[in-house]
Image (spheres, coloured by chain):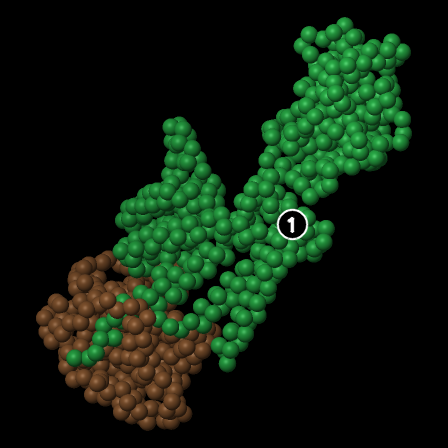
Amino acid sequence: MMMPWQLAKQLEAAGVLGMNGRNGDFVLPCNPRRLYPLVDDKLLTKELARKAGLAVPELYAAFRFSGEVRRVREMLDKYQNFVIKPANGSRGNGILVIKGRVGDSLRLGSHRLMNWYDLRFHMQNTLSGIYSLGGQEDSVIAEYCVEFDPVFQTITHLGVPDIRLIAYKGVPVMGMLRLPTSESEGKANLHQGAIGAGIDLASGKTLTAVWRNSVVTQHPDTLAEVSGVQIPHFARMLEIAADCNAMTGLGYVGVDLVLDRDKGPLMLELNARPGLNIQIANRAGLASRLAAVDRAGVDNLPAAERVAFAKENFKARVN
Amino acid sequence: MRNLHVYILAAVLAAIGLGLFAYKLTVIGIPLRAYLSVSSWLVESEIRVTADGGPLKVTTFEPRDSQRFGVLDRRLAAPEFGTTVEPIGPNRQINLTIRNVSGQLAARQRFLLYRDEQQEPDRAPRPPVPQEITLNQTAQAIAKALYAGAHGKSADEKSLVSVLLRDLTSPDPSENVRYLLGDDRTHRRIAAVAAQILRVNGGVARAVHGLDLAKSGISVSAVTWLEVHIGDRWQGFTIPRGEPRIPLSYYAWWRGDAPFVRVAGGKLDRSRISVTRVDQTMLRQALALGKRQEAFLTEYSLYSLPATQREVFRVIMTIPIGVFMLVVLRNIVGLRGVGTFMPVLIALAFRETHLVWGFVLFSFVLAAGLLVRVYFEHLKLLLVSRLAAILMFVILLMAAITVLSDKINFERGLSVALFPLVILTMTIERVSVIWDESGPAEAIKMAVLSLIIAAVCYLLMSTHPVQHIFFAFPEMVLVLMALTLLIGRYTGYRLVELLRFKVLAEPHA
């Protein structure tokens, strides 16, 4: 039986970052509160990314008032596939993926059917703040529905797999591939039951994966191997992540990317308080990597050099 | 740099807090524990008179420190009257006067008595003034005869007085005694007559009236005894038994033949004295005693507040410890409940409902509220309407519980006051929102965790030592604040994270 303080010592030696450490040493000093709306409101993030020249899923429509919701059908009927999401949502809540039509009904990504009336109700709820952080009034975004790259075909279930990179002072420090499962109902959030696979920043290959706090090597639905998968365009993703700090002014940020079959890597959203589970997926601590960035003082170098620094220093120790 | 600033601030706060604490503890002598049983009593007197319409004068007596008891915190509330206090003999007489008034008027007096054994026994010189004799010639002769009779049956002055008192109070009184007392056989009359008999025979004596503090109640009657100057001090004798020993519980309020209240120009409707034994008072006394020397710190303490605010602050001062508990649970243990400080509010609500019943009530109403929520889910209602409907249901449910528990005489149910009701509805709202945001499993987990955290906070906040410390030493909040600041800069692992990241501590394969 290991004593708590012994365990704490070992974790510290492994460079593991705790919640208090993340908040006190990185989020509070690096992320000024006034900048949070930039990442909390996905409409603002989209606009910011568009200006910075980063690829994002195309915005089809934005709904800010309940009156606008009545016009949803005429605005979106021309798109076969689209995604409805709250602008201030968190943890993937309130997202509807619409994939085609069956008669007059909308077909959801989860193979359920929904009529336009139900969609309007969902949007009204979203506007009244049901999915927003803190429950304040919200907007609804309708955007391009990502067709994920075939490389993920065998290792995902229902939803869209995404790649989470953590960028600190312009340097990507850790990455994770998040794979939806039947349990997560298509969502890519680990706490909802998705798989997280660590990524070797140098090669873009997946490492071990974590699912429900245990280490797995196969996807529970498809039984396909989730380790050792080469993520296409990974270098481009690192570049996008490296740009996000300067773009938002946030020194410590989680960057969520998707890989579209046709459009390549698209930046989905940013997070000012990215979760710590990524450490378990990578079987590596964040604290030591963040300290390495601080020591190197590379934040003023060009993006390519910062990415090179990441590839050089944050190689996987195993594999 | 930032850490240094926090450390210095925390050190300063802690130093101020602990310094004040140590000073109050050692120099002023405020006790660390609340219930060191030192007796004190709250005495309240209420006088109601009906005025005739002309000038009205009501006379009563101000309490004074006696040989065994000290008086504290004396307050006189007689708003309609003009008040003067005049020293008359051994008493301080309160004159309440008002001109041209009719109808009922009230005057109240309230003070605290505490046992104060330090005072010297009454060594009083023999009063120089010859004392008033009210008896007529015949009565004086009878008084002399009675005195002579008692003198014959006694050995010294003390036993003489005892014998005399026994004669006066005998169930089968002699002709002489009957003549002197008339039909009035009250102790007050007996004491007055005994004093007269002794005065006629050259003694110095007076009646004493006061309270037997061993008997407390809403309406207590005054006790009367006799004081005779023997040797160089006043010696008390009980009535009716004439024992030369006054019980330790007797407090002497006023002396002489006068009744407690005299009314001129009106009618006395009621005169009532209540005595309540007060606990927690060693402290109160230390403070009040301190008042004489340590004016500032005690004058401006929470104890100087009126009773109602004092009780409110007794509760409020426990909030910091509950909040601190929450900080520890959140940042060091890693547990969090609904809302930021909701568990502390629930803990406060538990104060009114008590723990077990509070737990049952909260769980039941919460569960019922959430079930209704699940049902409403199918109706596809907008957020605010749905929450409003749930809250209305909760209020109806609580009304039903209260009525039912009243019918079956289950008193606990009635303790659902306004405050717990508000907290409960807020909790249901928060849990509902979590349900929407993160699903039922998370919502139920959070609700259960909140209740557990609330119970922990309640247990801590409701213990007497904790309440006492923070009420008597509010500066301890500064120490808590210092600790909170330090925790605010604690960037180490939370306890639950040790489990969560345990896999990372193991050496790699």
**Hey, which residue is sitting farthest top in the picture?**
B175
Q: Chain of mark 1?
A: B
Left-right relation of B271 to A156: right
For disc 1, the neighbor class at 10 Å (few under 14, some 14 to 19, many from 20) is many
Q: Name which residue lies at 31% across and 46% down.
A: B367
Nearer the observer, B419 or B461: B461
The image position of residue B388, as x and y in percent, is 40, 47
Nearer the observer, A24 or B118: B118
Left-right relation of A267 to B186: left
Q: Name which residue lies at 33% across and 80% down.
A: A287
Q: Amino acid at mark 1?
A: Leu
Count of numbered labels shown in the rendering = 1
Left-right relation of B231 to A86: right
Nearer the observer, A245 or B280: B280
* Whether residue A150 is visible: yes
Looking at the picture, does residue B349 appear above or below residue A250?
Answer: above
The image position of residue A26, as x and y in percent, is 40, 78
Looking at the picture, does residue A228 appear above or below residue B400?
Answer: below
Chain that is brown in the image: A
Check disc 1 and report the residue beneath it: B287
| Residue B330, quarter of the rendered image | bottom left
- SS class of the residue under badge 1? helix
Nearer the observer, B50 or A225: B50
Chain that is green in the image: B
